Image: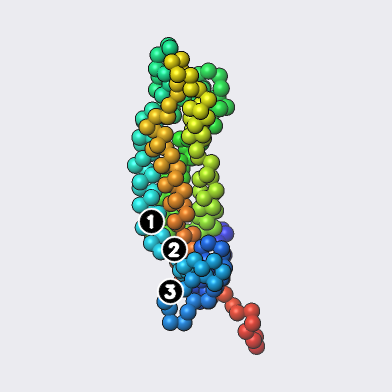
Amino acid sequence: MSRELPFIARQARQAGLLNCHICGQLSRAPAGGGFLRCPRCRAPLHMRKPASLATTWALVIAAAILYIPANLLPMMSTASLLGSQEDTIMSGVIFLWQSGSWPLAAVVFFASVMVPLLKIFALVYLAASAQRRSRHRLIQRTRLYRMVEFVGRWSMLDIYVITILVALVKFQGLATIQAGPAAVAFGAVVVLTMFAAMSFDPRLIWDPAADSAPSSPDPDSDHA
């Protein structure tokens, strides 16, 4: 049995109210339309984020393109008296696994490979379903969006590790560690997916259901 709500409660849009994206203040839309600013923080007010889907698609596609070099190019270059070595994300995971540090290998693999990939797939699914005005699994899609938005800031594990190693291991003539080209691509993937989640308006998920469902009964109306 479907767990969706039997009706969609009246939206702020239907009541002529606008929600500030910055401070959350509700304001009444002007009768004749036109430009309006939040009375509390003076930010521009919109019924929905302008060009939300177009911006989300552009950022997700850019992140998907950069995800390839982020995993194929060297993430870290090590030079010492014994020679030089370049490591990708997967080669680092394999090294940790073979050296017996399989819990750390699992953490790096999940945080640096799976999380960015799953975020890209999730954002594509959310943007595509909102663009098709799907009324399927509204609650689950809203929870998925909240999860994507929450985990975005925790995807920079490899960048943090490289930054610490570059700062600590700096023995000129003996050993040096430098960030590889994949670090730039990987950081761009994380930032782009974070911006994509921020640009996506989750209210677009519920708009099709609210437009097609009967309005909820007015609690203030008189009953015979």
Q: Secondary structure at mark 1?
A: helix
Q: Residue at x 51, y 48 (%)?
A: 148
Q: CA distance from mark 2 to mark 1?
A: 10 Å
* Residue carrying label 2: 49
Residue 37 vertical placement versus 93 (above, below):
below
Q: Count residues near mark 3 (Cα–Cα under 10 Å), then give few for <14, some for 14-19, many for 20+.
A: few
Whether tag 3 and tag 1 are in contact, CB under 8 A, the answer is no
Q: Is residue 222 left or right of residue 127?
A: right
Q: Residue at x 43, y 26 (%)?
A: 178
For the residues carrying marks 2 and 3, which lies nearer the camera in this image?
A: 3
Q: Count residues near mark 2 (Cα–Cα under 10 Å), then give few for <14, some for 14-19, many for 20+.
A: some
* Residue carrying label 1: 55
Residue 116 vertical placement versus 98 (above, below):
below
Q: Which label number is shown at residue 157?
A: none
12 or 140, which lies in front? 12
21 or 118, which lies in front? 21
Residue 146 on image: x %, y %: 54, 52
Q: Amino acid at mark 3?
A: Phe
